[in-house]
Amino acid sequence: MLGGPVVTYVELKCPRCGAPLPSTAPTGEMHCTYCAAPLVPSAGGVRLQKVIDPADLPDPDRPRLWLGGRRYVLLGHLGSGEGSEVFLGRRDHRLAEQVVVKVMRAREDQDLMAHEFDVLQKLQRATHQGAHHFTRLLPEPIAHGEARLGVKGNEGLHTATVIRHSPGFVHDFDEVRAAHPKGIHGTATVWIWKRILEILAWMHQTGWVHGAILPKHLLVHARDHGVRLIGFSRAARRGQPLKAFTANAKAFYPAAVWEGGPASPATDLTMSARSMLWLVGSGQIGAKVSDVPKPLADLLMRVAGDDAGGETDAWALLETVKSVAREAFGPPKYVPFPMPGWD
Ligand SMILES: Nc1ncnc2c1ncn2[C@@H]1O[C@H](COP(=O)(O)OP(=O)(O)OP(=O)(O)O)[C@@H](O)[C@H]1O
Ligand SMILES: [Mg+2]
């Protein structure tokens, strides 16, 4: 028997063709001398390097970014926010889901963007009554962080957030107003406000105040009569002051909250009524409201007051809106809401 230490060695083989590789451990990228497979070191010896050939991708000329280990392709520009450029995207994968990608524009908004992602995650995890239904009406966060730009992720970094896309919610109030310059019809006032109040009622139960219910943060689904809230970066726990305000939107905030007072569900109610008045009053809060029956216009004006006209509960206000609407228009019925492209 031979004495001395036992010598073992690992025979490295090419994972593609099975041919032996040089016995020295690879330290960087190498190629198999038999089949030219690109190889990189890995725990077990070597593995095949995945080579992305941009020409093999669908839409190879479109911008790409990596976030959370997934690559996304940007399909088009949806809008400009205060701190971000917002794009429609899709996971760069077969049968891929569509997403909304918010790419941060100004470094100083980093905290706001991270806060929005955190709030959206907390809302998705909330278990308050109705969570199963209402969480699906809120933006669903997928990933947030430093995104690596480019097909290979080597073209720079940008802070970004990826959110699941809800098809059909395409018109913010700016676009609705542009399509209805004389103000929307009274029946549309009812369903749009009702949808906002339903989501707020659930969100307030979870202890959050949106804090920026503004025309830019309300997306309308014209055919399904749906509304979604976006722009959660200023959300606050009820009773806390808002940490940030949307520039040029002072007229939408209750004065005391704008001056640093605590935010409450009533803050969102006031801002919802002011956004509705902005829409029906063709861009001015409290201007002559066309096509809105007087009891509904009066209710909007009252809730638009700094104290939400004494309203504190979105569910209770929703019931009032329903009964005022029934008096004005009779039982609820579907009245088509014309928007370009959705007729
Ligand atoms: N899910 C979406 N679908 C369609 N358009 C969207 C969507 N999300 C955002 N947009 C468009 O992008 C604009 C800016 O979005 P958003 O307000 O979320 O960005 P932000 O102002 O940078 O963020 P925040 O308001 O949270 O600080 C919106 O007004 C809208 O026009
Ligand atoms: Mg915004």
Image (cartoon, rainbow, N blue to C red):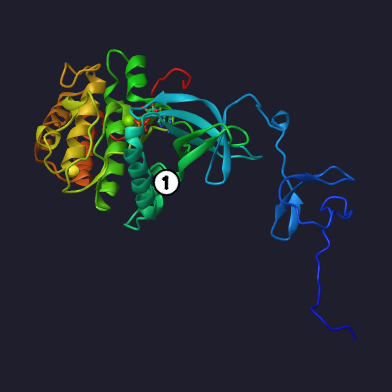
Residue extending furthest top?
Answer: 181
Label 1 beta carbon less than 8 Å to ligand 1: no
* Residue 10 placement (x, y as % from top left): 80, 65
Instruction: Identify the residue at horizontal 32%, vertical 24% (top origin).
Output: 173
Near mark 1 (Cα within 10 A), the count class, few <14, some 14-19 or many ≥20, is few
156 or 327: nearer the viewer: 156
Which amino acid type is shown beneath numbered disc 1? Arg
Judge from the rendering whether residue 233 lies leftward or rightward of residue 36; answer left or right.
left
Judge from the rendering whether residue 74 lies leftward or rightward of residue 19; answer left or right.
left
337 or 82: nearer the viewer: 82
Quadrant in which residue 301 is drawn: top left
Q: Secondary structure at mark 1?
A: helix
Q: Looking at the image, in which quadrant does ligand 2 appear?
A: top left
Instruction: Identify the residue at horizontal 81%, vertical 77% (top origin).
Output: 6
Disc 1 marks which residue? 136
125 or 17: nearer the viewer: 17
Instruction: Identify the residue at horizontal 31%, vertical 35% (top origin).
Output: 332
Above or below residue 235? Residue 246 is above
